[in-house]
Image (tube, grey):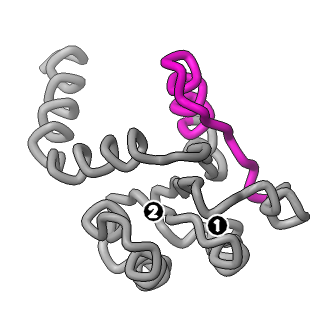
Amino acid sequence: MGVGWRRRSFLNNFFEKCDYEQIAAFCRSVLETKGTVFFSGVGKSGFIGQKISMTLVSTGTKSVFLSPTDALHGDIGILTPDDLLVLLSKSGSTEELLKLIPYARVHTPPHAIPSPVPGLKAEPLALETASKTGRDNSLLAYP
């Protein structure tokens, strides 16, 4: 088996496991956001958030990457109830993001925690925030 076959196998596995309804719900939430779409994450998840944010800006969508560390030191105050905060984490248990959620609640933007890992520490927090915001719970209830 060559390297090309392995790559194709990984891609096929990814697309077979995608929940396209949740992807569509996420896209609708971004399109319906009246304010700014904020992305936050640590490490590679942070780099992915930065790239998504820059791509949205190139389409005319207001979007910003918010460093979780800077947010914890006061930058969270930029959020408004019209904003969408998307927290990216592979494990769902990133300490900086878990610490950020209670502060984000004060500003009441909805937030999503996409993660492939079931049983996240952050999952109940996302569900609770989703019910308070009235936003589409299927998006916010990731994984």
* Tag 1 secondary structure: helix
Q: Is residue 134 left or right of residue 65?
A: left
Question: Between 85 and 120, which is closer to the camera in this rendering?
Answer: 85
Residue 139 in which image quadrant? bottom left
**Horizontal side of residue 15 vs 129, given as left or right:** left
* Residue 36 horizontal/vertical position (percent): 61, 43
Residue at position x 68%, y 41% in the image: 65
Q: Is residue 101 magenta?
A: no
The quarter in which the C terminus is drawn is bottom left
Q: Secondary structure at mark 2?
A: loop
Q: Which residues are magenta?
A: 48-69
Residue that numbered label 2 is attached to:
113
Callout 2 touching callout 1 (CB < 8 Å): yes
Amino acid under disc 2: Ile
Residue at image location 14% in from the left, 20% down from the top: 5
Q: Is residue 124 above or below residue 37?
A: below
Precedes in sequence: disc 2 or disc 1: 1
| Residue that mark 1 sits on | 97
| Camera sees residue 95 | yes
Q: Nearer the viewer, residue 88 or 2?
A: 88
Instruction: Residue 32: give x, y in percent of width and height.
Output: 40, 45
* Residue 143 seen in render: no
Type of amino acid under label 1: Leu
- x and y percent of residue 16 in the render? 9, 42
